[in-house]
Every structure is written in structure tokens, then in C-alpha cells.
């Protein structure tokens, strides 16, 4: 499997596989975000999910894939720090604001800075048409956030801090997307990176979540929470794994922009699952996001 993936790097077939992986990651990332914002406290949801994918990844990291090369340990340390900061900011943002407002801002901030980071780190250059597509996509994402902000009837008193946290989270999305791409390209076997990434990344937040659970006046039952965490762990494997493989096979910037069609899926999930209101204006803005992604792909 690893040899087959490596053989696709830089080829047209690799580009098509990366495209499919990025779109799959977009849908699954929206599901992942909804799981964290659902009926359980975001801190607890994230802790249960992280514990699940840490335990799932450990046997593969320790006994199946080749061990990381010596230079990878420093890379994993930096990745761990970046992801911890990202998770803390995301949990705080979801605690303070509505999912359909916070999520578009997080995802809208990320791709612009990821494209810049991909240029600085990998020398990737977007065409003028692709930059137009980025502009259309960002207009749709931030338009969706603004519309949600205007019509929100709950959590308005904390929305200002929620939006500030969402922007900060988006910056860390760009940082982890770019550096994760660097990490998965720095090892010979991409599955070595994925297995060790998930084991290391998932080992810290469960302790923070458990401490938060113990401080709660009415802590929820652990059974349903862990069931949710198990499902979330599988989604995380598929979502984050897909986008990281896509960034190894093809351009980091393109994969990052295409993933942000997750905002469309997030709005649909907010409407269908979380029972948040969706109207024709929001549908039009979602179409704008999808159009921006198409322009980026066609302009490449």
C-alpha cells in the first residue's frame, strides 16, 4: 500500500486520488466538528475522541508500521505542540459560540494562510485563476459566518470572544496543515507518520478532559461519551488521514482549499442534525463556497 501511494506522487493519477481524499476529508471533518459541538461538552467530546484514536493507533505504531527515522522525533514534538494549541483554542471557541458561526470562521481563516505557508515551505504557486477561486470561497465562508452572526438568537453575549477564538484557531489550522504536510513528506513510509501521529496526538487531551469532567457539577455518564468518542476516533482517522495523504500526493495549498468545502457539509449537518436554521441566503453562500473550490481545482 505504501509503495503504491509513493508511486503516485507527482503524477496525474496522484492528483486525482488527492482530489478525492480532500473532498472526503471535507465531509468527514464537518462530521468531526459536529461531534465535538454536539450535546456533550466540547472538552469532553474532544478528550473521548482523542483517547479512542490514540488507543486505535498504538498497536499499528508499535507493531505494524516501520519505526520513525531519528529525525522524525523533533518533527513529532513540534506537531504535538501545534495540535495541542489548536485543540485548546477550538474547544474554547465551541464553548463560547454557535457551531454554524464558529466553524465557518475557523475553516475560512485556514486556507488563505495555508496557501501562503505552502509557498514559503514548498515553493507552491497558485495561478491568478486559483487566487480568484480562493477569494470566492473565502467570500462564501465569511459571508456565511456573518449571516449566522446577524441572525443568531442564542449565545450572543459570548459571540465576540468566540469569533476571536475562531480566528486564532483558523491560524493554527493553517499551521498544522502546512507542518503536517512537511512531516508526512519527511518520512519514507506515510503510514508510519500517520500511526505515530495519531498515537502521540491523542495522548494528552484525554487527561485535560478528565480533569474538566471531575470539576463539573453534573458530569455526564462515561458510557455514551466513550461511544461517541469511538465513532469520532474512526472519523478522525479517515478525515485527518485523508487530508495528510492528499498533501503528500499533491499540492498542499490545493488540498487545504478543497477541504474547506467542509463548511458546506457543516451547514447541512447543523441544519439536519443540530436543528439549526438554514434559509435560501445560506444555501446561496454555501454554493459560493463550492464554486470557489471548483475554480481552484479547474485553475490548477
Image: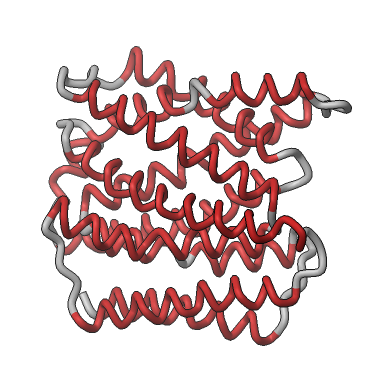
Where's residue 171, x and y in %? 40, 53
The image quarter containing residue 62 is top left
Q: Residue at x 52, y 39 (%)?
A: 87
Q: Which of the image's four quarters has the N terminus? A: top left
The image quarter containing residue 66 is top left
Q: Residue at x 32, y 45 (%)?
A: 244
Residue that lies at the very extreme toward the top in this rendered image: 63
Give the colour scheme of this rendering: secondary structure
Vertical placement of residue 123 versus 231, above or below: below
Vertical placement of residue 155 versus 90, above or below: below
Where's residue 260, x and y in %? 44, 63
Q: Which of the image's four quarters has the C terminus? A: bottom left
Where's residue 192, x and y in %? 27, 27
Is 68 positioned to the left or the right of 44 in the image?
left
Name the foreground residue: 66 vs 199. 199
Q: Residue at x 38, y 74 (%)?
A: 293
Is 85 positioned to the left or the right of 180 in the image?
right
Q: Residue at x 28, y 21 (%)?
A: 65
Report the number of discs: 0
Residue that lies at the very extreme toward the right in this rendered image: 218
Is 66 positioned to the left or the right of 51 in the image?
left
Name the foreground residue: 296 vs 86. 86
Name the foreground residue: 51 vs 112. 112
Where's residue 108, x and y in %? 46, 65
Amino acid at each position: 500500500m505504501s509503495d503504491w501511494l509513493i508511486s503516485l506522487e507527482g503524477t496525474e493519477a496522484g492528483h486525482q486520488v488527492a482530489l478525492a481524499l480532500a473532498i472526503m476529508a471535507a465531509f468527514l471533518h464537518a462530521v468531526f466538528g459536529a461531534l465535538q459541538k454536539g450535546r456533550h461538552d466540547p472538552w469532553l467530546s474532544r478528550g473521548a475522541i482523542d483517547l479512542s484514536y490514540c488507543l486505535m493507533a498504538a498497536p499499528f505504531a508499535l507493531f505494524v508500521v516501520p519505526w520513525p527515522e531519528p529525525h522524525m522525533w523533533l518533527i513529532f514534538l513540534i506537531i504535538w505542540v501545534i495540535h495541542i494549541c489548536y485543540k485548546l483554542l477550538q474547544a474554547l471557541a465551541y464553548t463560547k459560540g454557535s457551531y454554524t458561526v464558529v466553524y465557518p470562521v475557523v475553516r475560512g481563516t485556514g486556507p488563505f494562510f495555508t496557501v501562503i505557508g505552502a509557498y514559503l515551505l514548498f515553493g507552491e504557486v497558485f495561478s491568478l485563476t486559483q487566487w480568484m477561486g480562493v477569494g470566492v470561497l473565502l467570500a462564501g465562508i465569511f459571508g456565511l459566518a456573518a449571516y449566522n452572526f446577524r441572525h443568531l438568537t442564542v449565545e450572543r453575549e459570548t459571540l465576540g470572544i468566540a469569533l476571536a477564538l475562531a480566528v486564532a484557531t483558523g491560524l493554527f489550522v493553517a499551521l498544522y496543515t502546512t507542518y503536517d504536510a512537511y512531516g508526512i513528506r519527511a518520512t519514507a513510509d506515510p503510514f508510519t507518520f500517520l500511526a505515530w501521529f495519531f498515537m502521540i496526538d491523542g495522548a494528552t487531551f484525554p487527561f485535560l478532559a478528565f480533569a474538566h469532567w471531575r470539576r463539573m457539577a453534573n458530569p455526564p455518564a462515561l458510557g455514551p461519551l466513550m461511544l461517541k468518542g469511538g465513532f469520532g476516533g474512526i472519523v478522525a482517522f479517515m478525515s485527518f488521514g485523508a487530508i495528510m495523504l492528499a498533501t503528500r500526493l499533491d499540492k498542499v495549498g490545493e488540498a487545504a482549499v478543497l477541504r474547506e468545502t467542509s463548511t458546506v457539509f457543516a451547514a447541512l449537518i447543523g441544519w439536519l442534525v443540530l436543528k439549526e436554521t438554514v434559509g435560501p441566503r445560506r444555501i446561496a453562500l454555501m454554493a459560493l463556497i463550492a464554486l470557489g473550490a471548483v475554480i481552484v481545482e479547474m485553475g490548477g
